[in-house]
Amino acid sequence: MISWPKELTKLLKKAFVQRSSFQRKMSKAFSSFYRDAFNSEAYLTFCTSLYGRSLPQFNLIDSDQWDLFLEELKGIPKRGSDRFLDLGCGMGHNTLEVSKMLKLSGVGVDFSEDAVKKGKKLNINELTDVTFRLGNFHDPFFLQKNEKYKIIFSLDGLYGLKDWEDMLTLLLDRLEVDGKILIFYSSILKEYEEEGPLAKALKSLKRKKNGVNFIFRSYDFTKQEEVLLRRTDKLLEDFKASFKKEGLDGLYKTKKDECKKGLFWHQKKRTKRLFTVIEKVSF
Ligand SMILES: C[S@@+](CC[C@H](N)C(=O)[O-])C[C@H]1O[C@@H](n2cnc3c(N)ncnc32)[C@H](O)[C@@H]1O
């Protein structure tokens, strides 16, 4: 019998505890953002000026990216019984909009308690069949058994994934044939890399025999992201006083830090923003 070295057990336990506590901190940070953003007039006006849509969004999806997303959604053959899944749904504004537009039922998953609460609250007066629920992508069982979807999307929600291949394998398994997975994702590249972890994982899965048959394509929005971050940074200055008036300096700072970090990597040419569309051809 192979004996499991005690030191290794200790190290694994420590890594697990550190990872869980990091996840808890992350989800709390998102929750605090959502508590501030949900009712803020300043944030809503700021987002409307920036993105041209009247909702308090928390992603880097400009109007061109949103239009392309809608076009891709419209191209999917759908029946009334089909369902969609929104990964990292935040406060659910986009989840509900997709449901209304496609007339489909769906599920929004997020690990922030406040995001899920806000999603449920928004949903009360809507005539849509959308369920918001708590779930963490790092939990291999975050999707219920036998859940299947025609559309799976993530609008800047799949951050901090350690194993893209595992996640994609799970999502492809839960995707119906002819369905699509649509992912907006900005990655920080290692010095020698030209593509992010998502493209790398998809290519690796494609090489594997006995896998699900799928095709994929990516739209590169790296340049647009840099432009958006510069606009955001500038616009934040115009809104600084309005945030202060509402006592939401923290919101201003979070967005300011996001710009600073993003622009740092753009300057180094070590970031890539892709909109990736994966179509399941057959099992
Ligand atoms: C940048 S926000 C995007 C929110 C939303 N998709 C939108 O477009 O407004 C990222 C979201 O992903 C969620 N998230 C991040 N890591 C997660 C994880 N491991 N499990 C579940 N949700 C996660 C966060 O709570 C947050 O709501």
Image: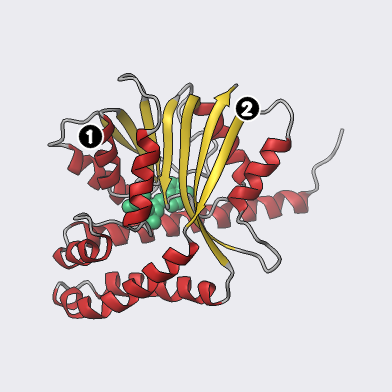
Query: Which amino acid, mark 1?
Result: Lys
Quadrant position of the N terminus in the picture: top right
Up-down: is 36 above or below 154?
A: below
Name which of mark 2 and mark 1 comes first in the sequence: 1
Quadrant position of the C terminus in the picture: top right
In terms of depth relative to the viewer, which is nearer, 30 or 267?
A: 267
Q: Give how far apart the Cα atoms at labels 2 and 1 are.
A: 30 Å
Pinpoint residue 235: horizontal percent, then vertical percent: 27, 75
Query: Which amino acid, mark 2?
Result: Val
Question: Which residue corresponds to mark 2?
Answer: 212
Pinpoint residue 127: horizontal percent, then vertical percent: 16, 30
Q: Is residue 211 left or right of residue 50?
A: right
Residue 134: tell me if it is visible: no
Q: Is residue 170 left or right of residue 256?
A: right
User: Around disc 1, counting alpha carbons within 10 Å, would you say few (fewer than 14), some (14 to 19), or many (20 or more)?
Assistant: some
Residue plotted at (56% across, 39% down)? 216
Residue 140: tell me if it is visible: yes
Secondary element at image label 2: loop
Question: Which residue corresponds to mark 1?
Answer: 100
Secondary element at image label 1: helix
Pinpoint residue 248: horizontal percent, then vertical percent: 22, 71
Up-down: is 106 above or below 51?
A: above
Residue plotted at (20% across, 74% down)? 243
In terms of depth relative to the viewer, which is nearer, 212 or 178?
A: 178
The residue positioned farthest toward the right in the image shown: 1
Residue plotted at (33% across, 31% down)? 106
Q: Are marks 2 and 1 in contact (CB under 8 Å)?
A: no
